[in-house]
Image: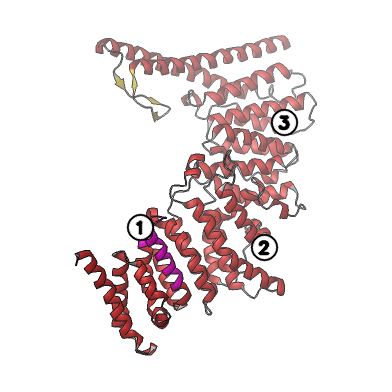
Amino acid sequence: MPEEQSQTIMAVDELQAIIQRCQILKEADFRGEDFNLFQVAGQKCLEDGYAAQLLEVVQNEKNKVIIKNMGWNLICPLVRCILVYKQEDDKREHCLKILDQLVQLCNAKELFLGLLEQIEQTSGEQVCQTVMLLLQPLQTVLFKLQNKKAYSVGLSLAMIMNQLTPLPVPYTKQQIQEDKLGLCQCCNAVVDFAKPFVNEVVKNMEKSSECNDMELKEELLKFCVKSLKYPLLTAQLEQLESIEEHPFRRFATEIIDILWDMRELIPLVFLHHKGRSPSWENEEFVDIEQKNSADSLACLSYLMFVQYFGIDCFPMVFSPSYLLQCNMTHIEVLLKRTEESVLSKGLDLFESSLLRMEDNSLLHQYLEFSDFITVPQRKKSLNILQLFIDKFDAEGKYTLFRCLLKTSNHAGVEGYIVQNIKDQIHLSLTKVCDNSWFTGHHLISLLDLVLLLPEGAETDLLQNSDRIMASLNLLRYLIIKDNEYNNQTGVWTMLAKIEQNFLKPLHVGLNMSKAHYEAEIKNKKENRREAHNSNTVCSVTVSGEKMPAMTTEMQLQVLRSALFTFDLIESVLARVEELIEVKIKAVT
């Protein structure tokens, strides 16, 4: 007899021997040894490829009581074999039928724990495969549980989400289409798994104004909150060409629908406004919500107000300024994250909130927010900064400018603000916008912040060149547009102060900086001649930051560029001083 056939007979004979011994015992007489022997023999049949014989045993009506008590022990080897066999393999089909039989026959509590254990033990590339394999059996078992059903549903969803969370979220179109780890498919399978339990809650809510399934509702709400943070917070949710049904957009739609059906969508949107907190019966959930839900609620606002998921359900009774105020907390949360996909959601939510408002309608009380200025997406951030400025009334613009000049610590942003100040002054002087905030004593106070060098002659002129050029252009505009007799801007009153705090230190600083950079250029040229090689790689420090390694020639280009910037500043400075001199002579 061939050795392989002999092993087959041994594995099947061992299982049959145990079955025959247990068939004559009463259920109460089963011993721990019987469970162990059944598990070992059943596992050997599966691992040796004899699932068909094991299926016959499981399907045999005489073995019903044995399978009911011992069958759950086969879950682990069953799952392992199913994942190994290919889709078209008959052995895989036999294993799936065994699993289905176990779900029908086994003790629900034991089987529930066995299924959860398999999900908990899976890792890496097999996470999504295992979860999707066991969702249907798990759902069936949960409906069989009489006690602690809500707790068991919550435990299942929490375990599944904990296993999925470490997996990277596909972001690009190609990654989403490939779905290498199966996450896109798995997320939607999980939400389908949750739907019958949602329907149960909704039906009970329809029967009574007070929900009798509060515990189950809370567990489902926890799942929704977790789903908003992962995968939706970092997922790419824009419509993509040639993808008929975007998996994450479908998932987002399902989560929003669940929240709406359970009457929790609108309360969640306003949850964090003015420190409101939910009135959960489960105190433990209150702590979880407060610690972990900020990202989730921010994502929910993004879904609703940028992607318009669930917007049809939203009551159109709130003013744009109130919605902006509500979204400020969420925008701040998103912009404090470092991931590009999350930062862009923060900027999009801010932009969307601002676009709903009319220009010059936002009161200065909304000024506490400016986190978007530090976001790496410079062009997008500046566009939103301009949008933000435009929405404020005159007092709001004035206060915002003062605040940003004092706190931004970014010469580019400060230069941008100075340009905006110039625009507002122009509107006031040309009577297009008659207000007192950009003329007279208010403007003088603002110009004190603009027309000065932060560290006098020692100021790093290269690093602050954007602000300095903008300030000089503003001063040139004021000298040309506002004459000494009208002095609407107050610039002529504070001319001596401007010369002392801005123009003279700038002269000194330019002379020092040019001398320093000219000496550096001379030094580099001498070193190059000595080395007889212009391709020697060196490092250079600009504005306190070490630049990438550069050849001597590249360093010379950087130094010459700095000198060009100083020459540009010097030429505008000379023009400003010439205009001042001409005006003063005309008066005297």
- Considering the image in quadrants, where does the C terminus appear? top right
The residue type indicated by label 3 comes to: Phe
State the residue at coordinates (47%, 44%): 178
Residue 91 shown in magenta = yes
Q: Say if 398 sits above or below 277 in the image.
A: above
CB within 8 Å, label 3 to label 1: no
Which residue matches tag 2? 261
What mark, if any, has residue 438 been given in the picture?
3
Q: Mark 1 to mark 2: distance in Å?
A: 40 Å
> Range of the magenta residues?
81-101
SS category of the residue bearing label 2 = helix
x%, y% of residue 161?
A: 48, 60
**To which quarter of the image does residue 26 belong?**
bottom left
Q: Tell which circle, 3 or 1, labels the residue nearer the N-terminal end.
A: 1
State the residue at coordinates (47%, 26%): 460
The residue type indicated by label 1 comes to: Val
SS category of the residue bearing label 1 = helix
Mark 3, Cα crowd under 10 Å, few <14 / some 14-19 / many 20+, is: many
Q: Mark 2 to mark 3: distance in Å?
A: 52 Å
What mark, if any, has residue 84 been given in the picture?
1
Q: Is residue 37 left or right of residue 28?
A: left
Q: Is residue 383 left or right of residue 10?
A: right
Q: Single out the mark in the foreground, 2 or 3.
A: 2
Q: Nearer the viewer, residue 365 or 256?
A: 256
